[in-house]
Amino acid sequence: MASGPHVRRWWTSHADPSPEAIGRRCAADIDGTTATRIWIAEVNGRSVGFVQDYRVGDHPDYALLAPDPDAVGLDYAIGEPEWVGRGIGARILWAWMLKAQHRLPDASAYFAAPDHRNEASLRVLEKVGFTRGVWFDEPQGDGSVATVVGCTLDIDLVVA
């Protein structure tokens, strides 16, 4: 899966965005040996994006900002530029939500926090039922700060 400029714009804290470097950094998450899980999204057998999830409460700094510290946090991206703007993002998130509901049946909410300028991501979240909430500053790995929008989805209301 490639990582085009449309992804690197929002994921600036990673020095090397190549698929090989991402694979090395995220191998334990992909293998399921950490609390964060990464799911590869495929279309016709080709990797086009990912979703990663984690319990917000496992990250105390985030738990203070999320409306529900027991929520499942998620991050996602479509890395292949030719798949951007084709509706695949909403389908990926919906498929992930259906699987997550069975894997994590005690969760009552999902929480994502995209950059406040990332309107494409905010629209995808709204399409699948997230609501925008509090804006907050999130420290990045490179020392910068990103202003993000906390978006929450009530699982019982939208997915169940």
Image (cartoon, rainbow, N blue to C red):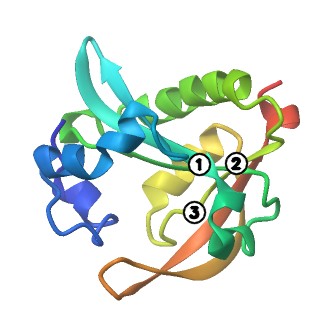
Query: Circles 3 and 1: CB distance less than 8 Å?
Result: no
Q: Earlier in the sequence, mark 2 or mark 1?
A: 1
Element type where label 1 sits in the image: strand
Q: Residue at x 25, y 13 (%)?
A: 45
Q: Residue at x 54, y 34 (%)?
A: 93
Crowdedness of circle 2 by 10 Å Cα count: few (<14), some, many (20+)? many
On the image, which quarter does residue 151 sit in? bottom right
Specify whether 38 is left or right of 3.
right
Specify whether 4 is left or right of 138.
left
Compared with residue 151, is residue 3 higher up or lower down, i.e. above or below? above
What percent of the width, then of the height, locates residue 21?
15, 52
Crowdedness of circle 3 by 10 Å Cα count: few (<14), some, many (20+)? many
Q: Residue at x 41, y 29 (%)?
A: 88
Specify whether 6 is left or right of 2.
right
Residue type, mark 3 in image: Ala
On the image, which quarter does residue 41 sit in? top left
Q: Earlier in the sequence, mark 3 or mark 1?
A: 1
Residue type, mark 1 in image: Tyr
Q: Which residue is mark 3?
A: 113
Element type where label 3 sits in the image: loop
The extreme top residue here reads: 44
**Can you see residue 87?**
no
Distance between the Cα atoms at labels 2 and 1?
17 Å
Compared with residue 113, is residue 19 higher up or lower down, i.e. above or below? above
